[in-house]
Amino acid sequence: MFEVLKHDLQSGEFLGAPFHRVDMDRSLALANRAMRGHERLQHCDVNVAKIIQMRSDPNLARHVRESDIVCIDGAGVMLGCRLLGIATGGRVTGVDLMMRTIDLCERGGFRPYFLGARQEVVETVVARLRETHPNLKVAGYRNGYFKREDEAGIVADIRASGADCLFVGITSPIKERFLFEHRDALNVPFQMGVGGAFDVLAGKVRRAPRFVQAMGMEWLFRVLQEPRRLFWRYLSTNTRFGMLLAAEMLRKRTRPTRNGQNG
């Protein structure tokens, strides 16, 4: 991890989750710097679901906290920070940062590696990118279905590919644990977990329209696409998040100030 992250980046915290105050342009510039200097930059993000998951999974919480850079992805986190008066650098959506990094790879001659999703999905992603980015050189790709005992071989393959960046399209907490445990052995400068972004790029899942994204309602758009699988998950997660946020807002309002009065 290069020294700028130790001295130059401002950090914050929201409901126990850490983040850095960076926007999309700054995140992309850091990815560019990492790839050009061949210095490790392991990217992580936080959203509502991950914050809830971190509270019951200490390993995930550690893996997020010890990432080189943590960006705010979720609109719910941005809203919560505004309500609590917590300064942020802005929202850095994972799929957008991935696509902008791919654009950068094509222009700069960097080589991405794609790890995750089903084999037919990741193959479709690579095929589509070769159509939309004809000058892009792909270091390699592989599906995200493997056992722990397979990881040493996968890491060796990625390392041997000479990739400049790695996108891991696997669910939490697996992708965070994989990157945390192997980030040095991978020898890939820019490493980023992208969750279900491969399904979006492959056309398997539709992304919310821009106006829905601006409203912070992507989660509802996802639920409408897969109601049976996602309804109760989002209901439970959002309910717990709302309760935590309300409790923190109440605690902040009733916290005594230095002169003895309530804030």
Image (tube, helix red, strand yellow):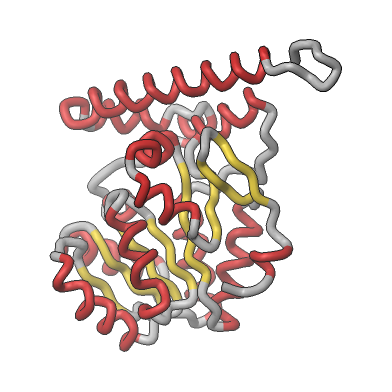
Q: Is residue 224 above or below residue 96?
A: above
Quadrant of the frame with the C terminus? top right
Seen at 33% across and 51% down, the residue is 195
Q: Is residue 191 above or below residue 23?
A: below
Seen at 28% across and 62% down, the residue is 125
Q: Is residue 77 above or below residue 181?
A: above
> Percent from the top left, x then y, of residue 251?
60, 18
Quadrant of the frame with the N terminus? bottom right
- Can residue 83 be seen here? yes
> Percent from the top left, x then y, of residue 172?
31, 49
- Judging depth in this view, the residue of 224 and 196 nearest the camera is 196
Quarter where residue 218 is shown: top left
Q: Is residue 137 left or right of residue 84?
A: left
- Can residue 95 be seen here? no
Seen at 38% across and 86% down, the residue is 162
Q: Is residue 16 above or below residue 103?
A: above
